[in-house]
Amino acid sequence: MATIQAAPAASRATIREASRPLWRNPSLLMGATLLAIVAGLAIFAPLLTPYGPIDQDLLNAHKPPSWAHPFGTDNFGRDVLTRVLYGARIDLMIGLVPTAITFVTGVLLGAIAGYYGGKIDTILMRVVDVAVAFPFIVLLIAIIAMLGPGLRNMFIAIALVGWISYARIVRGEVLVARNAEYVLAAKTLGFGDARIIFGHVLPNVITPAIVFFMSDAVLNILLGTALSFLGLGPQAPTAEWGRMIQEGRQFIVSGEWWMTTIPGLAILVVGVAFSLIGDGLADLLRVEERV
């Protein structure tokens, strides 16, 4: 009976560890607070600024930061602060929505391949090998070029390719866990494969994938801004940070730094927030404290 209770005991240890006060994990607290502030600014953007994200005022174009426009205006007279706030909505979506899709897909495929092995594992790994043979950004650009530019097609492209990392992470963990004593005990008791995978194996191997999720969210935001910079993301006049940088780069030489610097700083802030959350989760859920 001691062997059979190994997995639940590990799960209870994880729950106790996860219930620690957040102030004992400053990285997680700071990251979550910073991300909550950015999300709040994005949600309540209509209440925080009197301008619209695509409202043009050509008479006030190229204006430096002032009381009326704290972050200045762009070449069409659009308020940069307003566009940064509304752009946060799109960039947070880029960081969270496709990452969540790839997380779920990759974890499921990796768990199934690692648990069953055989032909299923072989086929999945051959697909992974083919995809890894191409540079990630080149593969994404090729897919978007076929589908056409736009936010939806960007999500589709990331979802088609991004699951690979999660599948490899979870598969490796499951290959080890499937021979653990608590899994063998569950099989002896007659538990079904689905119950063993989702009730015993995944709760004990999913930590690395959760931590990677935060890093992947940052990478997807950077990827989204890069694709927008290349004209493959949301199209004008949509407010998106990468698009804003692309539109303002030609005015840097004339001293209009705010058109590119402000959205660039916004990307940096969100990246730091996700990175801090990832570091905090790594401390909170590290494997050695779960055993």
Image (tube, helix red, strand yellow):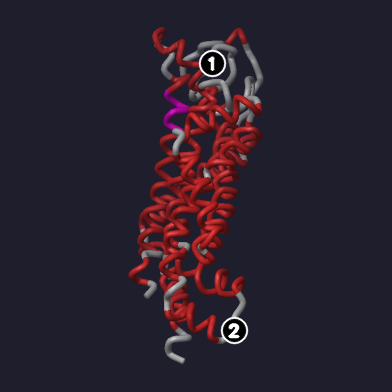
Residue at image mark 1: 74
User: Measured from the top left, where is residue 159 in percent x and y?
Assistant: 59, 42
Residue at image mark 2: 190
- Residue at x-position 47% and y-position 75%: 11
- Amino acid type indicated by mark 1: Asp
The local secondary structure at tag 2 comes to loop
* First to last magenta residue range: 261-266
- Residue at x-position 33% and y-position 69%: 288
The answer to which of marks 1 and 2 sits earlier in the sequence is 1
Inter-mark Cα distance, 1 to 2: 66 Å
The answer to whether mark 1 and mark 2 are in CB contact below 8 A is no
Residue 284 lies left or right of residue 138; in this view the side is left
| Badge number at residue 252 | none
In this rendered view, identify the residue nearer to me: 119 or 106.
119
- Residue at x-position 49% and y-position 46%: 128
User: Measured from the top left, where is residue 129 in percent x and y?
Assistant: 46, 44
The local secondary structure at tag 1 comes to loop
